[in-house]
Amino acid sequence: MTTAKNVMVIPARRRLGNTVQAEERPKLRVAAYCRVSTDSDEQATSYEAQVEHYTAFIKQNSEWEFAGIFADDGISGTNTKKREEFNRMIGECMAGNIDLIVTKSISRFARNTLDCLKYIRELKEKNIPVFFEKENINTMDSKGEVLLTIMASLAQQESQSLSQNVKLGLQYRYQNGEVQVNHNRFLGYTKDEDGHLIIEPVEAEVVKRIYREYLEGASLLQICRSLKADSILTAANKPHWRPETVKKILQNEKYIGDALLQKTYTVDFLTKKRVKNNGIVPQYYVENSHEAIIPRDLYMQVQEEMVRRANLRGGKDGKKRVYSSKYALSSIVYCGQCGDIYRRVHWNNRGYKSIVWRCVSRLEEKGSECTAPTINEETLQTAVVKTINELLANKEPFLQALQKNVATILNEENDNATNDIDSKLEELQQQLLIQAKSKNDYEDVADEIYRLRELKQNALVENAEREGKRQRIAEINDFLNEQSCQLEEYDEQLVRRLIEKVTVFHDKFAVEFKSGVEIDVEG
């Protein structure tokens, strides 16, 4: 005879959080999470109100023990990376110090569905519920996760809609040429009471110095060292300058009074990740949006010089060479036989140490066909001094030649070219707006705008080249008029100012001045 099975039901014990001794009915350790998403005065009031409300809300419940208020002020809820207080609260929960979390709403807790569900599930594994006051949802209820998924998805859609509205607002301001710049870390500018960019005189001189030194031949690293040596701080008030920072200053169109808007764009409203805009979304170029620090022609000369340095080549095969400005003659001495550059090297020839300049193809290529001479540094410097003294000894004919060069440059100028392009661009802009509003294809108009912008850029570069030549001619003209006696020794700074190129042949040196004048001296 078998004994009948006797089944006894052991009811679930109602328990929340990490409390183990349920029969003693200990108080639940309750924490609140508060967050506001902006730094405005109105939201600041909301933030303080939330903190005050939940402190009283928890303390007035006799079965609850106050476990703290965790509050993030002025931080977005679309992800949790920068929410320090939120992350600290989750850490306290995982450490077993909190039994229950109360918060105003799902959108205060998270606007990202995945983040929201991830943390709710992690907390549920620890038997820690979250109570959303506005939606009246307790995540430990059977219907909690279904409702939570729906509500969190709606909150995410709301955030996406808000993000889209912000984008549209920015584009509207861009189309009206309204420039928004964070001036706190923008060297050379600050803002007036109306929020417009204005020049900060002391910082503007630093910007001018950077442009001047670059055109005088200094490398980015040399400029950094020069600024640091003079105890000049960066825009972020740091003593250490980086070449990347100097390069950005040299390439920033805002220093000529223009502004390119929407250089980057947000690819994901949840992660807030921004990437460089390579034509994916529209850009807006605003000319003369504010007062310039750097003249336009000087800016274009810098851009041209950057391209030249980046594409420095030498030799018959046109190999790329690294630009150097360590010495005045670096990257301007060329081989008359193969066309490669000369490099300064320390030479040890049978125990005799010396500094020489040698063709790079002979240094780097085994079995090079080039037979260009190796030149002692003193010999090279003496040859340069000779050419400068010859220029000084024959001032009058050279001054006449300089005047002819200036006249030639003036005849080449064509400012009407850029004016014509501007007129065509203005017409195309109107056409583009009409076609965009009517939702017609505007690809052809966009292509023509890009083509004309490139033509305008080339015209500006040509104008800058001419202006650069005129300035160099004026500089040599001033030198010839001011210098009363010949040079007695080699001068690095003078060579940087005057000499464009030195070509080494077996029997002579051909020295080209920045004015275009060329003089040969015996080798």
Image (spheres, rainbow, N blue to C red):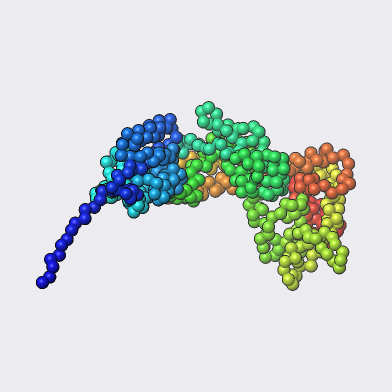
Observer-nearest of 422 and 217: 217
What residue do we see at 79% from left, 45% from top? 494
In the image, farthest residue toward the left: 1
Where residue 66 sits, quadrant-wise, is: top left
Between 400 and 12, the one lying in front of the other is: 12
| Residue 476 place in picture, x, y as percent | 78, 42
* Rendered view: 333 above or below 61: below
Number of labels in the image equals 0
Give the residue displayed 65% in from the left and 39% down from the top: 233
Q: Position of residue 89 (x, y in %)?
A: 41, 45
Quadrant location of the N terminus? bottom left
Inspect this view and state whether residue 489 appears. Answer: yes
Relative to 78, 464 lies left or right: right
Residue 201 image point, x, y percent: 64, 32
In this rendering, position of residue 365 left or right of residue 251: right
Q: Nearer the viewer, residue 2 or 242?
A: 2
Residue 139, given in percent of the width and then of the height, sits at: 29, 47
Q: Residue at x 52, y 42 (%)?
A: 260
What residue sits 66% from the left and 33% below the top?
202
